[in-house]
Every structure is written in structure tokens, then in C-alpha cells.
Amino acid sequence: MQGMKKRGGMNKELAGILKEMSYYSSLGLQVAISIVVGVGFGIFLDTVFETAPVFMFIFLGFGIAAAFRNLLLAINRSKKI
Amino acid sequence: MEHPFLFLVDFFNVNGTLYHFAHKYPHVIYTWLVMLLLVGSGFLAAKRPSLIPTKGQNFFEVVIGGLEDFLVETVGEAGRWFTPLAATIFIFIFVSNLIGMVPGFFPPTATLNTTGACALVVFFFTHYIGVKYHGVKYVKHFMGPVWWMAPLIMPIEIIGHMARVLSLSFRLFGNMMGHELVLGILFMLAGLYFAPLPIMALGVFVAFVQAFVFFLLSIIYFQGSLEHAH
């Protein structure tokens, strides 16, 4: 029991570092993919309704907004800790 | 690009159709191997559970207990019941990543199909948790703070959720595939002996980190749908 406690204590520090590192390293890819998903959905809507560049630009805006919203959530999260 | 020689695929050389299948979808064959390994070792370890654990039981208790502690520490006590799913995801992905270290073996996570399947499971379970805990009010997660901003926030949130699935699956797939490619190229260029060794050592690290990232991000997503709308 004592041994487990000690090991858990050492693990906690490492686990905290790993947690932060893996969370923040995932932010960049999230930004890129949000924009790609937005543009892709916009192009899909354009081919359905045949309104060439309209929806692409609208959803490009939505994609960029989603990307920045992710960053905002990360900022709030880092404030909380 | 594929491995120059896949060990298990040649086992299926007996029968024409099965060989074709094995050659075309090696990741399925190697997923079976991972399943066999995990189910077999789990069965052996938990065959006769005792109060004073034997070696196998002890090992699994440490692994699963550690994952459960980590999860409860991150999500809180309300998330303890996610442990079966989250720990399964971690162990499955970790073992699948590690199996690629063995020469002649193909990691199932180096194809978009396996990683996409895992990411979709996480995606659906996230919304299942949301609906289970909040009922119809789960829609509020997608509507933002004020009601008139809902048409603006809704597409943003939906795009964000789609991007989660893509980023989860592409990150794992890209890392494992890149590792396989680098290993293959080094094997071709630098010969079979010591040149690929540093990459293989790095591969063990990458295998752990990617499995952990997948596990942690899915936990964070579960937590996001568990708590109240902000």
C-alpha cells in the first residue's frame, strides 16, 4: 500500500506534464482541420445548390471562427489551472 | 507503401480468396492478432482472480488501476464509469502501435480505417454521454451563451465536433504511417542492421505518446459533454 502511494505521487507529476503537453500540442492540428472541415462543407453545399463560391466563403468564415474558438477554450482552460 | 515482407499475411497463403483478402487488408489481419493477444492475456490473467494477486493479475491491476486513477483525477468522480471504454482505447492503441516495432509486423493504427473507427466510437460516445446526462437540454451545448447567437454558434460548434474526429484519427494515423515510412526507407537505403535502430527507439516513445494523446483527448471530450453548458 505504501509503495503504491509513493509510486502514485511520482506518477502524478509526470502525468500532469504529459497531460498539458499532449493537450497543447493538439491545438495546431485542430486549427488546420477546423478550417479544412469548414471549407469542405461549404464546397459540398455549393455543389448541391449550384451557387458557386457563396457557401465556400461563408463556411470558410465559420471554419476560421471554429478554429479560434478552440484557441479561446484553451486560453480559458489555462486560466482555470 | 507497404512493408516489404508481412509475416502474418503469408500464413494465409493456403486458400486463394483468404490470401487475396489478407494481402489487400493487412491491417485487419494484424488487428485480429492484437485482439487475440489482448483477449488471451486478459483471459489468462483474470481466470482465477484471487485476493493475493498472481503475476498476470497484478500487472493488469496496475495498468487498469493507473488508468482509472488518472481518469478520475482528470474528469472527476462522475466519470469513473468511462474507464472500460477509455482504458480499452488506450490499451488497444498502445498494443497496436507497439506491434509495428516487430519486423514483419504491420501496426493496424497505420491505416485510416482503424484510427477512424476509434475516433468515431469516441465521437458517438461523447454525444451519448451528453444526451444521457442532460437529455434534451444537451442542445444548449451547441447554442452558446445567448439565444440570438445560436444560429452563429451552432455551425461553429458542429464544425468543431467534426474537426475533433478528423484530428483524432489523422494524428494517430499520420504518426504511425510516418514512422513506418521512415523505417522502410531507412531499411532500403541503409541496410538491415543498425541504421534504423534510433528510429525504432523513437518509435517506442511515439507509440506511447500517441496512445496517451488519444486517450487523454477522448477523456477531455467526455468531460466537455458531461459538464453543464457554459
Image (spheres, coloured by chain):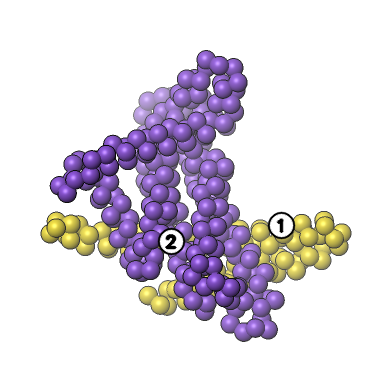
Chain colours: A yellow, B purple
Q: Which residue lies under the disc numbered 1?
A: A40
Query: Could you tell me the amino acid type at mark 1?
Result: Gly
Query: Could you tell me the amino acid type at mark 2?
Result: Ile
Residue B162 in sight here = yes
**Quarter of the picture holding the C terminus of chain A:** bottom left
Q: Which mark is residue B219?
A: 2
Left/right placement of residue B30 relative to residue A60 reads left
Residue B191 against residue B56 in the figure, above or below: above
Chain ID at mark 1: A
In the picture as drawn, the residue positioned furthest to the left comes out as A2
Q: Nearer the viewer, residue A39 or B197?
A: A39
**Quarter of the picture holding the N terminus of chain A:** bottom left
Name the element at disc 2: helix
Left/right placement of residue B212 relative to residue A59 reads left
Q: Are marks 1 and 2 in contact (CB under 8 Å)?
A: no
Q: Nearer the viewer, residue B29 or B193?
A: B29
Instruction: Tell me the crowding category of disc 2: few under 14, some 14 to 19, or many 20 or more residues within 10 angstroms, Cα based.
Output: many
Count numbered badges in the picture. 2
In the picture as drawn, the residue positioned furthest to the right comes out as A50
State the image coordinates of residue B114 (x, y, percent, origin top left). 53, 43
Q: Residue at x 55, y 40 (%)?
A: B111
Chain ID at mark 2: B
Name the element at disc 1: helix
Identify the image quadrant of residue A78. bottom left
State the image coordinates of residue A73 (x, y, percent, origin top left). 51, 73
Instruction: Tell me the crowding category of disc 1: few under 14, some 14 to 19, or many 20 or more residues within 10 angstroms, Cα based.
Output: some
Q: Residue at x 40, y 34 (%)?
A: B36
Identify the image quadrant of residue B71. bottom left
Left/right placement of residue B132 relative to residue B77 reads right
